[in-house]
Image: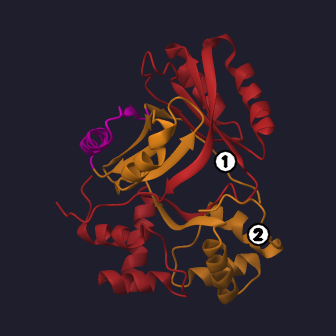
Chain colours: A red, B orange
Amino acid sequence: MRLDPQDRDIIQATQAGLPMTERPYRDIAATVGLSEPDVIARMQALQARGVIRRVALAPNHYRLGMTANGMTVWDVEDTRVAELGALVGALDFVSHCYERPRALPVWPYNLFAMVHGSSRAEVENKRARIVTLLGDACRASDTLYSKRILKKTGLRLSDRKD
Amino acid sequence: MTDAPAIDLDAIDRAILNALQDGFPITPQPFEDAGNALGIDAETLIVRLRRLHEDGTITRFGPFYDAAALGGAFCLCAMAVPAAEFDLVAAKVNAHPEVAHNYERTHHLNMWFVIATERPEQIAEVTDRIEAETGITVFAFPKLQEFFINFRVAV
């Protein structure tokens, strides 16, 4: 998808966040040299196209007591991963769920499901539900807990306009 | 970034955190509109959001862009970094603007980060540069399939 230059300017101006001011879209408009109604219309269109997933806040899970965050990983039979991945993704404690390639022999897992909880014990309990759900379609699994956030920014477009 | 879990949130803070995870209006006076739904005025909402952002309760506020919809790509990557080099390697990896998040995790593969680029072919350019700078293999785990989720943190 080619990005319209004005849309691109808006993305550049907002990718680090929205100003916390009374008229944030007017402030963005001033930055990119468009009118406020134009910025609003363009951002609404970007949201309708799915380029903007949503405008929202992201809470810091750790600060809110969700101190245990386990990336659970599973080696699931390829023929069943679509069906079972959909069931795992639908669990209310799973925040992300993807099929990814294995990297044999180092990494045998092809299904990733992020599980959050207030303790590792809670994450383990939730993980046990995934074990049950996958049954004998799962050959091996592991849980990788996060020890430290090293960086968290989000998408950044480069300044190049090529 | 602090990991301290103990923070004082009152009922209004909690209502803000719950409501604004779901969405924020794209309208001329969005804080007014979002505040109305919460029974507070725009100024109160702005002051509280600024405080929650400054104290680290909120990590981001604004549009969440889908790199794939922009014609770009996300890729989860992992490295097995020796403990003695860990912070140095983290600094080298984090110095790349394409690295959106990076976590230390409990595994032989102990550094997990997401690369976001505008064009899919740029993922390999970034992983090649990181390998050249660190001398450590970067394993790339691009998503093959994303499963629907409906997760949010109830505060």
- Around disc 2, counting alpha carbons within 10 Å, would you say few (fewer than 14), some (14 to 19), or many (20 or more)? some
Q: Is residue A152 above or below residue A28?
A: above
Point 43% across, 85% down: residue: A27
Q: Amino acid at mark 2?
A: Ala
Question: Which corner quadrant holds the C terminus of chain B?
Answer: bottom right
Q: Amino acid at mark 1?
A: Phe
Q: Within the magenta stretch, is there residue B150?
A: no
Horizontal placement of B120 versus B111: left or right?
Answer: left
Q: Can you name the residue that lies furthest to the right here?
A: B11
| Residue A79 coordinates in the image, percent (x, y) | 51, 14
Which stretch did the figure color magenta?
Answer: B119-143
Mark 1 or mark 2: whose residue is earlier in sequence: 2
Tell me the SS state at disc 1: loop
Q: Where, by quadrant of the figure, is residue B97 drawn?
A: bottom left
Q: Which residue is mark 1?
A: B151
- Around disc 1, counting alpha carbons within 10 Å, would you say few (fewer than 14), some (14 to 19), or many (20 or more)? some
Q: How many circles with numbers are drawn on the protein? A: 2
Q: Which residue is mark 2?
A: B15
Horizontal placement of A58 versus B72: left or right?
Answer: right
